[in-house]
Image: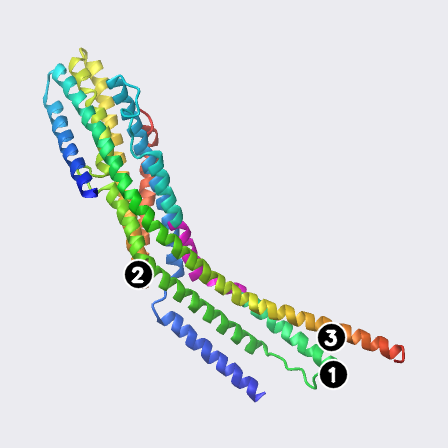
């Protein structure tokens, strides 16, 4: 489809150039005006063909982009795994602080028990 | 004490080996990957600028054509690129931007910094807890981590994480490379490699060619040199706009193809090629910005 559209667009561009050359060559204002009208007609069709070509490109872009988006998810997971490693270490540190608190509490209870003569 | 020394020696050797592994194998330069990400963002704005400028020219031509046909009809009023196309390209760039930012983050040395801090905190907490255990007579002797040993283990942990991050990034970049190549190549092809063959360059060029030739009948019928002079000045102005637009599109196409090269080099772990391609992108982005700045008023005035 793309190749056919490209061929059509190339044909229109060639025709457009031929009209430009003809306008440049004429010294008759009436002929120039008639050629300018034709030029606008061709340009209108160039615009349509160009947009159809872009639509075809956009469909392919959407397909390729979906795969890149999926790769971003994989990157995000890999990044998350690194953060998880730090989280595990943080978890152990937190656990040790709880151990310290438990030891402090045990110490306090031990002192209290000794004072009470238990 | 002997065991502690052996542990420290072991950790140091492992750290050195990992260092050699990371620097020895084809790892990607984090700075260049960061620049690739910057290049994608810059190309995104460069593309928006270029497509919007073409759409403006196209709309002006569509208005002229509707006047000429004396019809107010959607069939007559067509423009390219449409707002939907501009949005689609923007969305494509947003996905690429996110991907390149994630890639840069995964390779960045800063990524393992969270682990460094956590490991240092753990070592300090370990010593505190060990001292507490001894104070409470739960252990006869407090096992202490020497600062050297703690540092060595932190370093080993960081290197393992960095190696893992770099390996994951490289693997994902290799797997995604065909799609990235396809996206940038499709965009470059849509822009076109000349102003004479099918592509946005040729279409944008045609808009200005038409506008310039619109002046011809008036020029031929102008009776005074002053009137002719004014038409010639307008004609010259249109040609300048045409050339500025064409140069900007040429520059954008080069940026897109260089980004494709840069990603391929990144996937291959080829740092010199990656740096060179990213350098081209940054140069082209600056060039386009300069061109649009210089001709901004001219490009957006009828």
Gap between marks 3 and 2 measured at Cα: 58 Å
In the drawing, what numbered circle is on residue B272?
2
Judge left or right: residue A110 versus residue B109: right
Whether residue A89 is in magenta: the answer is no
Q: Nearer the viewer, residue A6 or B236?
A: A6
Q: Secondary structure at mark 1?
A: loop
Highlighted range, magenta: B96-114
Q: Judge whether B266 appears above or below B286 on screen.
A: below
> From this viewpoint, is residue A88 visible?
yes
Same chain under badges 3 and 2? The reply is: no
**What residue do we see at 30% from left, 61% from top?**
B272
Q: Position of residue A25 (x, y in %)?
A: 10, 23
Q: Judge whether B256 appears above or below B154 on screen.
A: above
Mark nearer the viewer, 1 or 2:
1
Mark nearer the viewer, 3 or 2:
3
> From this viewpoint, is residue B49 visible?
no
**What residue do we see at 39% from left, 73% from top?**
B21
Tell me which secondary structure the magenta stretch mostly adopts. Answer: helix
Judge left or right: residue B123 versus residue B284: right
């Amino acid at each position: 489809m793309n190749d056919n559209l490209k061929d059509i667009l190339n044909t229109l561009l060639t025709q457009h150039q031929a009209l430009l050359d003809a306008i440049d060559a004429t010294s008759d204002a009436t002929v120039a005006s008639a050629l300018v009208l034709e030029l606008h007609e061709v340009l209108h069709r160039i615009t349509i063909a160009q947009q159809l070509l872009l639509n075809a490109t956009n469909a392919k872009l959407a397909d390729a982009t979906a795969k890149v988006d999926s790769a971003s998810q994989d990157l995000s997971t890999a990044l998350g795994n690194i953060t998880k490693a730090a989280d595990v270490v943080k978890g152990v540190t937190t656990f040790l602080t709880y151990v310290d608190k438990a030891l402090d509490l045990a110490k306090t209870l031990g002192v209290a028990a000794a004072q009470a003569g238990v | 004490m002997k065991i502690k020394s052996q542990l420290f020696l072991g950790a140091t050797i492992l750290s050195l080996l990992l260092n050699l592994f990371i620097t020895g194998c084809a790892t990607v330069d984090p700075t260049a990957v960061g620049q690739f990400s910057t290049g994608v963002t810059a190309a995104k704005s460069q593309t928006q600028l270029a497509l919007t400028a073409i759409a403006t020219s196209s709309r002006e031509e569509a208005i002229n054509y509707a006047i000429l046909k004396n019809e107010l009809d959607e069939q007559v009023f067509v423009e390219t690129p449409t707002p939907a196309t501009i949005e689609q390209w923007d969305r494509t760039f947003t996905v690429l931007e996110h991907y390149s930012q994630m890639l840069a983050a995964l390779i960045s040395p800063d990524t393992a910094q969270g682990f460094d801090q956590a490991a240092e905190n753990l070592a300090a907490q370990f010593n505190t807890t060990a001292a507490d255990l001894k104070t409470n007579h739960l252990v006869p002797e407090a096992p202490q981590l020497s600062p050297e040993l703690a540092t060595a283990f932190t370093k080993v942990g960081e290197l393992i994480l960095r190696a893992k991050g770099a390996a994951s990034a490289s693997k994902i970049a290799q797997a995604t490379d065909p799609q990235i190549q396809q996206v940038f190549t499709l965009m470059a092809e849509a822009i076109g490699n000349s102003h004479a063959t099918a592509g946005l360059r040729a279409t944008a060029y045609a808009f200005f060619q038409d506008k310039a030739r619109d002046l011809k009948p008036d020029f031929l019928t102008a009776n005074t040199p002053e009137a002719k002079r004014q038409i010639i000045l307008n004609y010259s102005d249109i040609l300048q706009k045409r050339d500025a637009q064409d140069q900007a599109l040429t520059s954008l196409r080069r940026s897109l193809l260089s980004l494709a090269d840069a990603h391929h080099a990144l996937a291959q772990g080829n740092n010199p090629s990656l740096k060179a391609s990213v350098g081209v992108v940054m140069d082209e982005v600056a060039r386009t910005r300069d061109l649009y700045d210089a001709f901004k008023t001219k490009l957006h005035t009828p």
